[in-house]
Image (cartoon, rainbow, N blue to C red):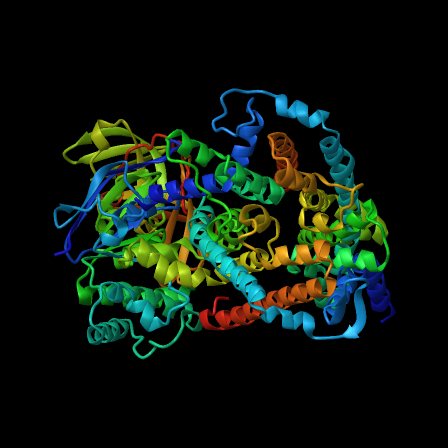
Amino acid sequence: MNATSAHARFGAALVAPGLGILTLFLFVPLALIIGLSVLTYSPTKIWLPVLTAVNYQKFFHPYYVGVMWTTIKIGLLTTAMCAILGFPVAYFLARAPARWLGVWLFLLVTPLMVSSVIRIFGWLVLLGRRGLVNATLEAAGLGGVDLLHNVPAVVIGLTELLLPFMVLPLMAAIETIPRSVEEAARNLGANSLQLFWRVLLPLSLPGLVSGSLLVYTVSISALVTPALMGGRKVRMLGNLVYDEVLTSMNWPFAASIAVVLLIVTAAVMLGYLRTMRGLARRSGQA
Amino acid sequence: MGDLEVRALVKRYSDSAIVGPVSFTVADGEFLSLLGPSGCGKTTTLRCIAGFETPSSGDVLIDSRSIAGRPPHRRDVGLVFQNYALFPHLTVGENVSFGLRLRRRPASEITRRVHDALSLVDLAGLEARYPRQLSGGQQQRVALARCLALEPSLLLLDEPLSNLDLKLRLQMRTELKKLQRRLGKTTVYVTHDQGEALALSDRIVVMSRGHVEQIGTPREIYESPRTRFVADFIGASNLLAGAVVSAGAAGVIVRAGALELRSTDRTPAGATTVTVLIRPERIRLAATPPPGADVNRLPVRVADVVYLGEDLQVLLDLDGGPTLTASLKATLAEKDWAAGTALTACIAPDDVRLLPVAVDAPVASEAVTP
Amino acid sequence: MRGRALFAVVVAIYLFLLAPLLIVVAVSFDPTDAFRFPPPGVSLRWYAAFFTSDTFVRAFFRVSLVIAAVVSVAATVVGGLAAVGLVRFLGRRRGLVDTLFLTPIVVPEILLGAALFLYYSRLKWETSVAGLVLGHLVIAIPYVVRTVSAGLAGADRSLEEAAMSLGATRAQAFAKVTLPLIRSSLVSGAVFAFIVSFSDINIALFVSGPETVTLPVHIFSQIVWQPDPTIAAASTLQILLIAVLLGVAQRVFRLRVTA
């Protein structure tokens, strides 16, 4: 008995520094934000210890509703694009011979690890007003076009950024489908589309949901991509937080936006967990 | 309606391993087995017929029409996989009706055909269960029903019984044979189990290291093997290195060690050295030499007796010669043959088979019993 | 049949994925400042501009590199200890603590950045290296914990027990048997922590100050205020650094698999 509690205490001691850092620099700040979101804004003192619901009520203002809607729209579009582009890649990697898999994975993961600013800079060079596409168009005498500062541009930027997040869990899910099941379907007469729709998709659903969750939650909290590729015309919740914190200094309002984002993320997570449990029960995959 | 021809099929792999050329035909309604150890190319051949491998050269024809160019989903063959490959997210009924639904058959027809297919394999009524709720044997029968529901011209089975335990395997074997006879489906069956091949097949293709060793009925394969490999792989054998002494109308005389044996077999293509095959159960043992001129009679001494319940294995020493293993039913034998007992071994000339000396096999002089 | 079409589609998607990076690298060698592709020639002038720019050099070497190195070491130590505690000592209570360590991955990074900024203001902390390091530690530690936990789970416990039966104390057995086995997880955890810190933009945008401008933050402000191909040179250098580190990490893993 003594051994196990000494055991556990030693374990607690090992875990303490990490938990300590997380508590002090993650949980406490988040808790403070939640608290700040219900306090009153003051232009002079930034916040007053007076409870109010004003910060959340502000969300119903048409401008902010618009920003919310843009954020959700971009989130859904990005997730859909990632799913469409991600599935072929995930299938290819899941069936790739081990010899080549390393190379393909390296090429997939490396962009992920490079700072998002750099990747967006690349898109700006390509799509910007003085960029490559425009330079080619102008050389052909077609005049310049503003390819940025719209929703599709932001979706393209986010899709490129987040595609690996969709591919990796989807690939893992497809790997669990035995090749003989695919061959059986083909033997019974399924062409590629039928194989995808009736066998691959239902059996890889957990991976698809997992990837979608990841892509959606990251894309709705995007800041750098809409800032650089969307400009003034495409504003997302992330841009709002940044401006309110560092420019307008309306911290209570910024906090409420943060809380809304947190709630949306948590809700999607919970929805995901519920779906997973339901799916597991239905398909009965051991 | 469903005859198959495999013509000079060759599959080349990048690491210079080759399967083929393989050629054989299967008549309509015939049960043919591809038999051999793992790596011999039998599964590759089957997959070429199913369309999951593309042959490097050669052709596959059904009813004299080439199907080699067709993708796997457009060939009229049913394939039963070793691990059944049932769709885990579909019920038994949905699994069996999968092919029918793809072909957009009307619902009433689908229900009827699914029911018929499941009845054939004795699983009627289980349409609503999921594969994970079934035993291995049941899953395998669902896999079979799934193919049969589409009424293909050709049925392919890839070691379907190897994941089942022994008793179930023997039981399924009988049921499979009955089913095939009843439906008259042309069947190609892949296995490494010689007992299975002998019991099930009308004809067997024995394969080794990517090429065909012999094609024949089970009786031909067992009693008249044409190569050392076939003799070795199927049944137990005594294999001796022999030199041809004389060959004439009355038969061939070979010398193996200190033995001289008479055989009614033909010498393989004018060879002077041969491998002599004597099946253990063809050696008759007697305490005193029986009368009669036409039998090889060898004086032997018992080295050891191994009791196997139903059978008795008797290891025999010959003076100055090779050792032989004889096999007899325990009921017929004198169980008290002690080591050293002198007996006479009688082998009919018909039972002395002559095989070509295998190129890479060691020239041994002892009996080889798998 | 389908195979070739699939391959073509996958290659196209990979080109999409890698296009921005390829363009950045190409532009960094462009002798003109007019963003052309393919560039009309090869020139190192933007790299020269990078190395002669005080702000860029400072951001890369004095800020980002240093912070990333500190974060890497600290995260590996703290995270490694936590992983050992989780896998070997906590047993039943593990579930909750496991989830706690996964939280930073779930929380959107800008929330963390904003929260830290507000927190530091409340505490009246000036922007500092420490503030940034701590912020990065929060997002780096979960990676280390996950990698090392997986490595520990794979390390056979009976090897430690065998060492102990031969006379080693528990600590010695751990140090001499298990530690070498999880060495590759520790290294890969360290590499990921480094990369996560070096590439971070969302937290740094909130928490960095005039003295602690990281490379990504500097690139960001340059894009907004003064875009020129020096950014491409800086970016290419970062890509190079990260690719090399990832390559090293993969090598370490390969070694593990065969050993």
Residue A147 position within the rendered picture, expressed as x and y whole percent measured from the top left: 46, 44
Residue B265 position (above or below residue B94)? above
- At 68% from the left and 51% from the top, the residue drawn is C143
- At 38% from the left and 55% from the top, the residue drawn is A180
Any part of residue A214 in sight: yes
Residue C154 position (above or below residue A273)? above
Q: Using the rendered view, name the quadrant where residue A234 is placed.
A: bottom right
Nearer to me, B158 or A32: A32
Residue B340 position within the rendered picture, expressed as x and y whole percent measured from the top left: 47, 47
- At 30% from the left and 44% from the top, the residue drawn is C1
User: Which image quarter holds the N terminus of chain A?
Assistant: bottom right
Nearer to me, A185 or B299: A185
- The residue most toward the bottom is B125
Residue B267 position within the rendered picture, expressed as x and y whole percent measured from the top left: 22, 33
Any part of residue B81 in sight: no
Nearer to me, B268 or C204: C204
Residue C135 position within the rendered picture, expressed as x and y whole percent measured from the top left: 76, 52
Nearer to me, A200 or A261: A261
